[in-house]
Amino acid sequence: MKLLRVGPVGAERPALLDEAGVLRDLSGLVPDIDGALLADDAALARLRGAAASGELPRLDPAGLRTGPPVARIGKIVCIGLNYHDHARETGAAPPEEPILFMKAPDTVVGPDDTVLVPRESVKTDWEVELAVVIGRTARYLETDEQALAAVAGYAVAHDVSERAFQIERGGQWDKGKNCETFNPLGPWLVTADEVPDPQALGVRLWVNGELKQDGTTADQIFPVAEVVRYVSQFMTLYPGDVINTGTPAGVAMGQPEPKPYLRAGDVVELEIDGLGRQRQTLRAA
């Protein structure tokens, strides 16, 4: 299924995009798309049955905002330097273990919402990423099979980053990762049954119409199953938690000088095969 949430900020309603591309209202069946729903197999089965029946009410998408596809996210765990080509472009050795950092859930906005360039920013950068959404409580997972069984689905994430804050201001990466609007998510949560191989997805991003990133999840240093298993050794993952799994080569930081960092007025578009497309216009905070 392709699950999404539509409507004004803070008043989104649950919806579904059916196989014919018709937007359907789920608010008569479930209150929202969140961890509670993703952990409820019976509720998900009812949604699948309702979608197959073709009887769900239609929604007119004209002028309707798409919000983040998951509500009440508990935490966002991010994986740094997780593509071989991205490690090469930044001059970093491939990590021996996954690099973990966190993003606050309040960085999440809809896939087409405005992204704010922080005050005093000089190095705001783009990063298209495959997001993994957890559907089962996961702690100390032992196998790849257990890890993939804990995945509810996948989405497109934009891990917007301010490199000067991240690298040049001391401390941890969090300074450059948690600015307001720095994690557009969606448009859809695509359930795991529709993504048979998360390591076979094309990942692309454009800035002002120019292709900047054109990679594949096959290039990940630590694949999705290993990432989920690994993270579960250090923290408990709960339904509705999100893992951003890293970005391929082509970020501004990896470009020759003068590096083309983002500015107010720029337009960023990004997509992952089968998971939909985002489009954001930047403006000053």
Image: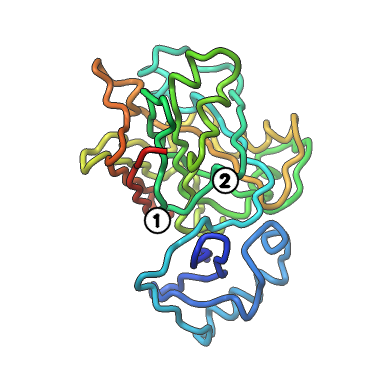
Mark 2 touching mark 1, by CB under 8 A?
no
Q: Place residue 158 in its image quadrant.
A: top left
State whether residue 45 is above or below residue 85.
below
Q: Place residue 28 in its image quadrant.
A: bottom right
State whether residue 161 is above or below residue 56.
above
Identity, as a three-letter code, of the amino acid under mark 2: Val
The residue positioned 61% from the left and 28% from the top of the image is 101
| Outermost residue, bottom side | 55
State whether residue 275 is above or below residue 95.
below
**Quadrant for the C terminus in the image:** top left
Task: Return the x and y of residue 18 as percentages of the image width and height.
Answer: 46, 73
Residue for badge 2: 132
How has the structure been colored for display? rainbow
Circle 1 — which element?
strand
Of residues 179 and 146, the one drawn nearer to the viewer in this rendering: 179
Give residue 276's mark: 1
The residue positioned 27% from the left and 34% from the top of the image is 212
Closer to the chain start, of discs 2 and 1, is 2
Mark 2 is surrounded, within 10 Å at the Cα level, by few (under 14), some (14 to 19) or many (20 or more) other residues, namely many
Left or right: 194 in relation to 202: right
Task: Return the x and y of residue 185 as percentages of the image width and height.
Answer: 49, 49
Left or right: 149 in relation to 198: right
Task: Return the x and y of residue 86 as percentages of the image width and height.
Answer: 40, 24
Left or right: 250 in relation to 161: left
Circle 2 — which element?
strand
Task: Return the x and y of residue 135 as percentages of the image width and height.
Answer: 68, 53
The residue positioned 59% from the left and 40% from the top of the image is 243
- Mark 2 → mark 1, Cα distance in angstroms: 14 Å
Identity, as a three-letter code, of the amino acid under mark 1: Gly
Mark 1 is surrounded, within 10 Å at the Cα level, by few (under 14), some (14 to 19) or many (20 or more) other residues, namely some
